[in-house]
Image (spheres, rainbow, N blue to C red):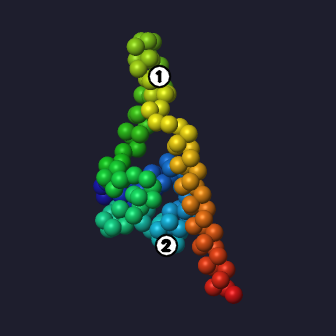
Amino acid sequence: MNTTNHIGRKISRIRELRGMKQEALASELGVSQQTVSNIEKHPAIETDLLIQVAHILGVTPEAIENFSEEAVFNIINNTYNNTSSDNSTLVASSVNYFPTFNTADKIIELYERLLDAEKTKVEYLEKLMNKKE
């Protein structure tokens, strides 16, 4: 089996790197946690589902298809663990410590996304409570 293009594993790793649990992804997809677990076990998934998952994870479908954990760690190592004594490479890598975006805007955006997720959870729980009554 070709494990390098196992879409389910790539979804799992991206989800984990984003700090998202299977339950949260399941809730966003409108499926059970077990369904997400099964998706992550399959080497391929339907295009429509891939597009949905990518949107929820905040990446493109191509990013999932082309995801390489090795590349992620290489970028991290090259950016933050530069042990070279050459000052030019140290200076070049330190540029990455200064974001090119407004951090306050990103914090607000993250807060709004978290707030929307919490609202969705509350709505879901209210639906469950109403079904029991």
- Residue 92 shows in this picture: yes
- How far from the left and from the top, in percent, is residue 83? 47, 19
Q: Where does label 1 land, which residue? A: 94
Q: Quadrant of residue 68?
A: top left
Position of residue 109 relative to residue 27, above or below, is above
- How far from the left and from the top, in percent, is residue 27? 53, 68
Q: Badges 1 and 2: C-beta atoms under 8 Å apart?
A: no
Q: Alpha carbon of mark 1 to alpha carbon of mark 2: how far?
A: 43 Å
Q: Tag count in the figure? A: 2
Q: Is residue 108 left or right of residue 71?
A: right
Label 2 sits on a secondary structure element that is loop
- Residue 4 shows in this picture: no
What residue do we see at 56% from left, 39% from top? 104
What residue do we see at 31% from left, 58% from top? 1
Check residue 56 in the rendering and tell me which mark sits there, or answer none.
none
Position of residue 54 relative to residue 93, above or below, is below
Report the quarter where the C terminus lies. Answer: bottom right
N-term-proximal mark, 1 vs 2: 2
Label 1 sits on a secondary structure element that is helix
- How far from the left and from the top, in percent, is residue 34? 51, 70
Q: Comparing marks 1 and 2, which lies closer to the viewer?
A: 1
What residue do we see at 41% from left, 58% from top? 55
Nearer to me, 5 or 50: 50
Q: Where does label 2 land, which residue? A: 31
Answer few, some or many: residues within 10 Å of disc 1's Cα (few below 14, many 20 plus, some between 14 and 19). few
Nearer to me, 79 or 133: 133
Q: Given the image, on which type of amino acid does mark 2 rest? A: Val
Q: Given the image, on which type of amino acid does mark 1 rest? A: Ser
Position of residue 50 relative to residue 110, above or below, is below
